[in-house]
Image (spheres, rainbow, N blue to C red):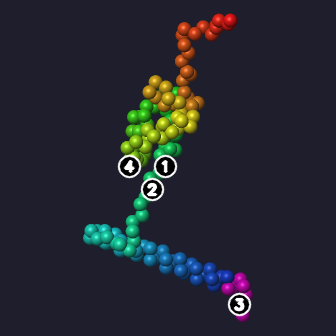
Amino acid sequence: MTTAREQMQLIEDELKTVRSHIEKLKIEEATLLRLIDSFGGKDSATPKKRKRSPSVKPVVLDIMREAGTLGASSAEVDAKVRETIPGVGKDTPAAILSRLKGEGALVYRNERYYEKQFAPQEPSNPFDSGLHAVN
């Protein structure tokens, strides 16, 4: 009679064998799919999965952090986002900049966006001396 430990070892050995077979079958499947593609055919049994593009918001935040006190225009951010994510939608970077500004993470001054911590101070009115008449 086998002990529980021996039974567990037999199960683990069988699992290793099954996983080995699965791995071999995956390699064989990939080879066959490449062959089908090379002949211009389509494999209807295995639909191709659409790859999801990486999230654009973190990329925009990284770009703004790197811009620091210089800030960045919408066009500059758009160009840098496209270097990282070439297939990004036409208006996506601008929409994210606008959303981040609305959330208070970015500040927009003089046609440039700044991360809040790097934003230039609001220009003061040179005609305002700080003194006000009181009745």
Q: Amino acid at mark 1?
A: Ser
Q: CA distance from mark 4 to mark 1?
A: 12 Å
Q: Amino acid at mark 2?
A: Arg
Query: Measured from the top left, where is residue 16 in percent x and y?
Result: 57, 78
Q: Nearer the viewer, mark 3 or mark 4?
A: 4
Q: Residue at x 49, y 79 (%)?
A: 21
Q: CA distance from mark 2 to mark 3?
A: 50 Å
Let me know if residue 86 is in the magenta part. Answer: no
Q: Vertically, is 92 above or below 41?
A: above
**Residue 63 visible in rendering:** no
Query: Dot 2: few (<14), some (14–19), or many (≥20) neighbours within 10 Å?
Result: few
Query: Measured from the top left, where is residue 1 in percent x and y?
Result: 72, 93
| Image side of residue 102 versus residue 33, left or right | right
The magenta segment is: 1-7
Q: CA distance from mark 2 to mark 4?
A: 11 Å
Q: Residue at x 54, y 8 (%)?
A: 127
Q: Nearer the viewer, mark 2 or mark 3?
A: 2
Q: State the residue in front, 83 or 96.
A: 96
Which residue is denoted by mark 4 in the rendering?
A: 87
Q: Secondary structure at mark 4?
A: loop
Which residue is denoted by mark 3 in the rendering?
A: 2
**Residue 58 visible in rendering:** yes
Which residue is denoted by mark 2 in the rendering?
A: 52
Q: State the residue in front, 97 or 128.
A: 128
Query: Measured from the top left, where is residue 59 in percent x and y?
Result: 49, 43
Which residue is denoted by mark 1 in the rendering?
A: 55
